[in-house]
Image (cartoon, rainbow, N blue to C red):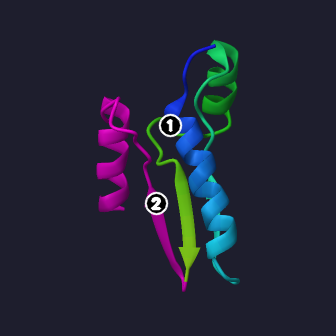
């Protein structure tokens, strides 16, 4: 089995946010990685944009988007482009 340090980090952050965020704040994730070509086609056909940040946190009418990295893998080209598009939106 491959090591998945970013998935482990995302689980840790989700556990923390579940504990730390008081209502009405909330968060969600975009578990887009893994699953092979069929899952990738399905996600794309339902509108998931490549490079979306891993988490969204909503609080006081503001949405924060968080990309989690362990330091082993840099941002992909899709992440760089999508993050720039989000900043511009």
In screen coordinates, is 12 left or right of 51? right
**Magenta range:** 60-89
Q: Which of marks 1 and 2 is nearer the N terminus?
A: 1
Q: Which of marks 1 and 2 is in front?
A: 1
Q: What's the residue at 56%, 80% (across, down)?
A: 59
In the rendered image, residue 47 lying in the magenta stretch gets the answer no
Query: Taking 45 as reference, is 18 above or below it?
Result: below
The picture places residue 11, in percent across and down from the top left corner, at: 63, 47
Query: Taking 49 as reference, is 1 above or below it?
Result: above
Query: Taking 85 as reference, is 17 above or below it?
Result: below
Q: Is mark 2 on a helix, strand or loop?
A: strand
Q: What's the residue at 63%, 78% (across, down)?
A: 25
Q: Mark 2 points at which residue?
A: 65
Q: How crowded is mark 1: few (under 14 residues within 10 Å), some or many (20 or more)?
A: some
Q: What element carries label 1?
A: helix
Query: Taking 61 as reference, is 54 above or below it?
Result: above
Q: Mark 1 points at which residue?
A: 6
Q: How crowded is mark 2: few (under 14 residues within 10 Å), some or many (20 or more)?
A: some
Disc number placed over residue 84 in the picture, else none = none
Q: Quadrant location of the N terminus?
A: top right
The picture places residue 66, in percent across and down from the top left corner, at: 45, 56
Contact check, label 1 and label 2, Cβ < 8 Å: no
In the rendered image, residue 70 lying in the magenta stretch gets the answer yes
User: In this orientation, which residue lies closer to the viewer: 20 or 23?
Assistant: 20
């Amino acid at each position: 089995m491959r090591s998945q340090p970013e998935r482990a980090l995302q689980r840790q952050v989700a556990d923390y946010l579940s504990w730390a965020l008081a209502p009405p704040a909330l968060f969600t994730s975009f578990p887009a990685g893994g699953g092979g070509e069929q899952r990738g086609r399905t996600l794309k056909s339902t509108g998931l944009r490549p490079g979306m940040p891993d988490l969204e946190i909503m609080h006081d009418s503001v949405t924060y988007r968080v990309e989690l990295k362990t330091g082993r893998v840099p941002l992909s080209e899709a992440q760089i482009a999508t993050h720039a598009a989000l900043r511009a939106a």
